[in-house]
């Protein structure tokens, strides 16, 4: 795979450059210069394939110039050892549960895949990379887990102090080893801003091979296309149009779906489901993209005021808003609606949604008003037990906490507190 920068379409980078660098020097985003279409035979038999078989076929079409088949096979088996079930919630709404990985959120897909690909491409003679990750909660722990004890790679996580749940914070701050957690006195956007500035800072660039593991890294994006094929495979026998609702923050997850669609996956439409952080929704209506400071909501992993994958999405549709709107519908929902639908669906069906999945469900519900015959998939991006403080009071039975989460709660937090000033952050990196 060769890649170009969204800011300069005539550039070309290798996969290794794109992954190790994270962002191109011109501050654009890496995009594949060619998106292969999968053959009809693949879609004809897709219902008979396991998730790892599907993942391998899709990955191979994209990466066959960069890895040999055996290595890719091993990486896929190693990364996706957990199940990816599609669970019926109502007659026309299914939850694609993406939270059965080690940190119980969908970011395990991207983070684990990226760690393994990076370790594979990295050679002894290369500079040792330091991964910088800004997180609003789930990214950091998924990346920390994915890279934990990967030799030669350090991970530094930046998270907004007091703005992640207790469980999320424990997941970020109890790894140790090659993983360091920086607790930033600021918002997620401040953390993201610090990481972006670090990549552009000449002193830091000279000092250390910095790389990103946010959803801007192409190695995170690629595996986020695999599970859309899985959803389609499981619903194909219904012979109905399939729509996918994606609870969105930085829009890496939706971008994975749009990539799948470009590869030929017959998803009728995507729904970009937002909480009150709705700059993308506003963009679809007005054609104007106006980043804003994020506001705090109960679906905090989606509290993003300046979505980092925005440029990729408009690039994919050649900046043609009308074309984009043919593929993507946008909706936005407040916390009250989100809480209400968690209670409502629980009382009607017994199914417990987390606040992010619930925003996805709401998007589907709105969409079904205009297209009642379609069958809908909403992405369950986190296990409800990760958001006990929100979900607990809304359901009348205890939310079962998986064992691996319970163990983490008893461990001691280790973090380093910093202000949101870039100079302070830079000094820290230079001193370590
Ligand atoms: C990160 C995250 C999202 C948003 O995904 P993006 O790719 O940033 O749009 C949604 N839900 C959960 C639980 C997340 O962790």
Image (cartoon, grey):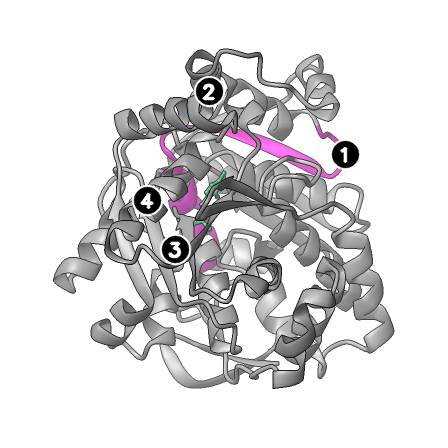
Q: CA distance from mark 4 to mark 2?
A: 20 Å
Mark 1 crowdedness (10 Å alpha carbons): few <14, some 14-19, many ≥20: few
Q: Is residue 334 left or right of residue 211?
A: left
Percent across and percent down for residue 408 are 70, 20
Q: Secondary structure at mark 2?
A: helix
The answer to whether marks 2 and 1 mark residues whose Cβ atoms lie closer than 8 Å is no
Query: Could you tell me which quadrant the C terminus lies in?
Result: top right
Q: At 58% across and 21% down in the image, what residue appears?
A: 167
On screen, 6 above or below 148?
A: below
Q: Earlier in the sequence, mark 2 or mark 1?
A: 1
x 68%, y 24%: residue? 174
Q: Is residue 210 left or right of residue 117?
A: left
- Residue placed under numbered mark 1 in the picture: 177
58 to 152, vertically: above or below:
below
* Tag 2 residue: 391
Q: In this orientation, does residue 35 appear? A: yes
Figure quadrant of residue 177: top right
Q: Dot 4 corresponds to which residue?
A: 365
Q: CA distance from mark 1 to mark 3?
A: 29 Å
Classify mark 3 as within 8 Å of ligand 1 or not, answering yes or no.
yes
> Would you name the residue on which mark 3 appears?
308
Mark nearer the viewer, 4 or 2: 4
- Which residues are the magenta region? 175-201
Residue 89 appears left or right of 320:
right
Q: Residue at x 77, y 76 (%)?
A: 67
Q: Is residue 157 above or below residue 51?
A: above
């Amino acid at each position: 795979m060769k890649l170009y920068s969204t800011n300069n379409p005539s550039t070309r980078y290798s996969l290794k450059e794109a992954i190790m660098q994270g962002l191109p020097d011109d501050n654009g985003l890496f995009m594949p210069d060619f998106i292969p279409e999968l053959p009809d035979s693949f879609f004809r038999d897709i219902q008979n394939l396991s998730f790892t078989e599907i993942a391998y076929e899709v990955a191979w079409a994209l990466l066959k110039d960069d890895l040999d088949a055996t290595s890719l096979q091993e990486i896929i088996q190693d990364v996706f050892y957990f199940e990816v079930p599609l669970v019926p919630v109502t007659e026309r709404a299914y939850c694609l549960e993406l939270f059965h990985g080690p940190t119980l959120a969908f970011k395990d897909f991207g983070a684990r895949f990226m760690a393994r690909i990076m370790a594979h491409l990295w050679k002894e003679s290369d500079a040792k990379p330091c991964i910088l990750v800004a997180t609003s909660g789930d990214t950091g722990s998924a990346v920390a887990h994915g890279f934990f004890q990967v030799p030669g790679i350090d991970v530094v996580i930046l998270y907004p102090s007091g703005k992640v749940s207790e469980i999320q914070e424990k997941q970020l701050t109890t790894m140790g080893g090659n993983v360091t957690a920086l607790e930033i006195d600021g918002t997620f956007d401040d953390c993201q801003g610090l990481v972006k500035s670090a990549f552009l800072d000449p002193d830091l660039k000279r000092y250390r091979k910095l790389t990103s593991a946010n959803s801007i890294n192409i190695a995170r994006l690629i595996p986020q296309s695999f599970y859309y094929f899985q959803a389609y495979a499981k619903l194909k026998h219904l012979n109905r149009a399939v729509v996918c609702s994606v609870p969105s923050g930085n829009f890496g997850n939706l971008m994975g779906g749009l990539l799948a669609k470009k590869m030929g996956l017959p998803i009728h439409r995507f729904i970009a489901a937002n909480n009150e952080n709705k700059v993308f929704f506003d963009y679809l209506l007005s054609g104007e993209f106006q980043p804003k400071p994020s506001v705090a909501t109960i679906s905090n992993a989606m509290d993003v005021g300046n979505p980092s994958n925005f440029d990729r999405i408009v690039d994919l549709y050649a900046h043609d808003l009308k074309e984009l709107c043919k593929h993507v519908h946008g909706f936005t929902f407040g916390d009250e609606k989100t809480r209400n639908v968690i209670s409502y669906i629980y009382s009607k069906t017994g199914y417990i949604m987390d606040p992010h999945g619930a925003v996805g469900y709401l998007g589907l519900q709105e969409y079904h008003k205009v297209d009642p015959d379609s069958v809908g998939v909403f992405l369950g991006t986190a296990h409800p037990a990760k958001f006990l403080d929100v979900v607990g009071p809304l359901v009348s039975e205890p939310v079962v906490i998986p064992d691996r989460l319970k163990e983490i709660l008893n461990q001691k937090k280790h973090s380093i507190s910093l202000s949101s000033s870039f100079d302070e952050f830079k000094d820290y990196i230079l001193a370590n």
